[in-house]
Amino acid sequence: MRLSGLVLLAVAGVAGCGHVDSSDVATDKMRAELELRSWDDGSAAMGLSLKARRPWRKWVFLSGDDALTANFRGEDVAMREEVVGKKHTYVAWFADVQSGEPITVSLSRGDGDDALSSTAELPPAMDMFVPDTDIDLGWDGIDVQWWPPSEDLNDQMTLDITGSCISNVHRRLDDTGSYFLPPGALNPSDEESPDSCFVELELRRERTGSLSDTFRGGEAMGVQIRQSSLWINAWTYSTF
């Protein structure tokens, strides 16, 4: 399942923040969040959000002559604004982006310092495999596999497992191609959790990118995302 760029790139960190006009904020007072995401169909979305530092601590929206473009294979693509709550994310979509191909995002300002060299690239793609049968966590656990493993030791792997009957799980993994969540490792979300539910698994391979040094810090990364789901019978056992 692949969600829209708006949901995937703009939803995090919305609560509790307002927004501020870019004309009121110098570039070196902005924190940048840059992420290039790709799914198993080869498409990719580059997203950038800007947050003003003190005294505002608010999301930035572009105004006037301020503009964001993403350069891929020598061609500039205007980035489109997507808004969730008060968070403004600027997104550009691309087809057939290969591992290691850089995409560079430039902030051009009508009045102020430009930030022209924020870059991310995708880590190697992978296929994800999970059991194709219902799981009884008291006996089966969850066996997650992916192929191929990355040869770059700097790439990071994470696994998130979510569902209505479990407490969410986040794991950092060694990029070996397999991970086993043993029986009894998941906990019910609360005392009234259903005994069974669908759980969503999201496997991420992340590669650190770079930001223009004009910004006041932030983070940049390229991410391969693979998603799957399972039906689990969660609480039909006794822990021991």
Image (cartoon, rainbow, N blue to C red):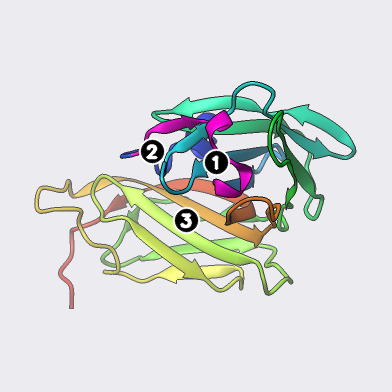
Disc 3/disc 2 C-alpha distance (Å): 35 Å
Q: Write down the residue under mark 1.
A: 50
Disc 3/disc 1 C-alpha distance (Å): 40 Å
**Residue at horizontal 70%, vertical 67%?**
150
Along the viewing direction, whichever of 213 and 220 lies nearer the viewer: 213
Would residue 191 be counted in the magenta stretch?
A: no
- Dot 1 falls on a residue whose secondary structure is strand
Do the numbered discs 3 and 2 sit on residues whose CB atoms are within 8 Å?
A: no
Q: Write down the residue under mark 3.
A: 131
Foreground disc of the pair 1, 2: 1
| Residue 121, x across and y down, in percent | 74, 52
Q: Write down the residue under mark 2.
A: 14
Of mark 1 and mark 2, the one earlier in the sequence is 2
Residue, far right: 74
Foreground disc of the pair 3, 1: 1
Q: For residue 75, which numbered disc appears in the image?
A: none
| Residue 64, x across and y down, in percent | 64, 21
Q: Which residues are magenta?
A: 17-31
Question: Visible in this render: residue 133?
Answer: yes
Query: Label 1 sits on what residue type?
Result: Leu
Query: Label 3 sits on what residue type?
Result: Pro
| Residue 151, x across and y down, in percent | 74, 71
Q: Residues within 10 Å of mark 2 (few under 14, many from 20)?
A: some
Question: Visible in this render: residue 1?
Answer: no
Do the numbered discs 3 and 1 sit on residues whose CB atoms are within 8 Å?
A: no
Along the viewing direction, whichever of 35 and 1 lies nearer the viewer: 35
Quadrant of the drawing holding the C terminus? bottom left
| Residue 184, x across and y down, in percent | 26, 69
**Residue at horizontal 43%, vertical 32%?**
19
Query: Label 2 sits on what residue type?
Result: Val
